[in-house]
Image: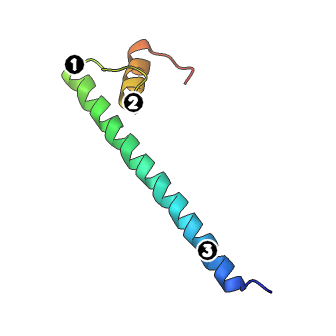
Amino acid sequence: MQINPAHHLDRRLQEIDQEISTALRDIRRNLSELEKASSDSRSGTPATRPGKDFSAVLQATLDTGDESV
């Protein structure tokens, strides 16, 4: 039994599409958190739950001036 190359290609394209969708979702979430951290820093709101989300980690890093990240 031989595997149809078109079927294999279609399946691989679907996997790549899923990977791209997942990466874009993560990027959108991180951008949203970055915007939140940026607006919080402008308004003086302290970061909450350090280490729990992107904005808290970013804010804590900005507050300490840690350049090792």
Q: Considering depth in this image, is 47 or 2 the residue closer to the camera?
A: 2
Q: Number of numbered discs present? A: 3
The amino acid type found where label 2 is placed reads Asp
Mark 3 vs mark 2, CA separation in Å? 34 Å
For the residues carrying marks 1 and 2, which lies nearer the camera in this image?
Answer: 2
Give the number of the disc on residue 11. 3
Query: Which residue is the extreme one toward the right?
Result: 1
Q: Tell me the crowding category of disc 3: few under 14, some 14 to 19, or many 20 or more residues within 10 angstroms, Cα based.
A: few
Q: Earlier in the sequence, mark 3 or mark 2?
A: 3
Is the Cβ of the residue at disc 1 closer than 8 Å to that at disc 2?
no
Front-most of 44 and 10?
10
Quadrant for the C terminus in the image: top right
At 58% across and 66% down in the image, what residue appears?
15
The outermost residue toward the left is 43
Compared with residue 41, is residue 8 higher up or lower down, i.e. above or below? Answer: below
* Residue shown at 61% from the left, 74% from the top: 11
Please, which residue is most extreme toward the front here? 1
Q: Which residue is mark 2?
A: 53
Q: Report which quarter residue 50 is drawn in.
A: top left
Looking at the image, which residue is at 44% across and 20% down? Answer: 61
Question: The N terminus is located in which quarter?
Answer: bottom right
Local SS, label 2: loop
Q: Report the front residue among 25 and 31.
A: 25
Check disc 3 and give the amino acid type: Arg
* Alpha carbons under labels 1 and 2: distance apart: 18 Å
Between disc 1 and disc 3, the foreground one is 3
Q: Which residue corresponds to mark 1?
A: 44
The answer to which of marks 1 and 2 sits earlier in the sequence is 1
Crowd around label 1: few <14 · some 14–19 · many ≥20 (10 Å): few
Percent coordinates x, y for residue 27 in the rendering:
43, 47
Structure colour scheme: rainbow
Q: CA distance from mark 1 to mark 3?
A: 49 Å
